[in-house]
Amino acid sequence: ETGVTQTPRHLVMGMTNKKSLKCEQHLGHNAMYWYKQSAKKPLELMFVYSLEERVENNSVPSRFSPECPNSSHLFLHLHTLQPEDSALYLCASSQVQGAGYGYTFGSGTRLTVV
Amino acid sequence: GNSVTQMEGPVTLSEEAFLTINCTYTATGYPSLFWYVQYPGEGLQLLLKATKADDKGSNKGFEATYRKETTSFHLEKGSVQVSDSAVYFCALLSTGNQFYFGTGTSLTVIP
């Protein structure tokens, strides 16, 4: 365990379903991130939260909706997804936004949209 | 703009072989450079980093030197082990505090 826990590890959902991904860290970090990892593509930054405020949204479709209720928890709510949204979704945290000593990543949620 | 380009894999090596994974970058200003490693079924872990030109990052026998003149940060290891099999990501942290990752290079080490 790295200190960032993601659940579930695997998720299969239909295009009409609604599901949520959860990320939790107890490292005392103030910034949290959602990344999408697709095969043969660079990691795509989706959302950034710093001190529970969203500071960046990189043109992510509205079928992805993040929520950060406190500095330890981050959610990604999913609805009416498309098959091309199938990917590994990684959560990361850092002490402050853009910390130069790197991020701590979770193990990811492998999402399959059918 | 900022971007990272790393060699495409997959790379397959025999145990104790020498490893080089190339990484070049484009950046405005003076970024910090990183290598992350992703073992099967896990998230990314920081492997090493360098924050300024000519710095050498090292960890677990891996090394990379920040070369400003060639805008490169190649990862090397003198003798790989089966346990080094993973996907390796080169990344830069821009002066605007955003990470840019490469596409990842898959390494398989066979006994």
Image (spheres, coloured by chain):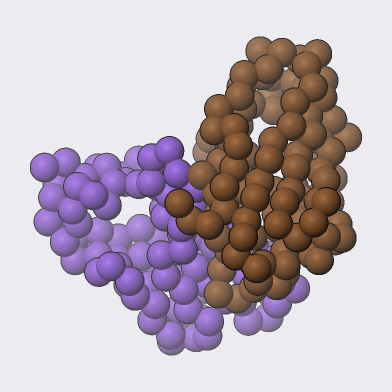
Q: Residue at x 23, y 49 (%)?
A: B83
**Does A22 appear above or below B26?**
above
Q: Looking at the picture, how far across and down is residue A38, in whole percent?
A: 58, 36
The answer to whether residue A9 is left or right of residue B74 is: right
Q: Residue at x 53, y 82 (%)?
A: B51
| The hue in which chain A appears in the rendered picture of the protein | brown
Whether residue B4 can be seen here: no
Q: Residue at x 60, y 76 (%)?
A: A100
**Does B91 appear above or below A83?**
below
Q: Looking at the picture, how far across and down is residue A49, in whole percent?
A: 79, 58
The answer to whether residue A51 is left or right of residue B49 is: right
Q: Quadrant of residue B80?
A: bottom left
**Does A48 appear above or below A6?**
below
Q: Nearer the viewer, residue A69 or B2?
A: A69
Q: Quadrant of residue A63?
A: top right
Q: Looking at the picture, how far across and down is residue A48, in whole percent?
A: 77, 57
Rendered-image quadrant of the C terminus of chain B: top left
**Does B47 appear above or below A2?**
below
The answer to whether residue B80 is left or right of residue B30 is: left
Q: Nearer the viewer, residue A65 or B19?
A: A65
Q: Looking at the picture, how far across and down is residue B79, in whole percent?
A: 16, 61
Whether residue A8 can be seen here: yes
Q: Residue at x 57, y 47 (%)?
A: A5
| The hue in which chain B appears in the rendered picture of the protein | purple
Q: Nearer the viewer, residue A93 or A40?
A: A93
Rendered-image quadrant of the N terminus of chain B: bottom right
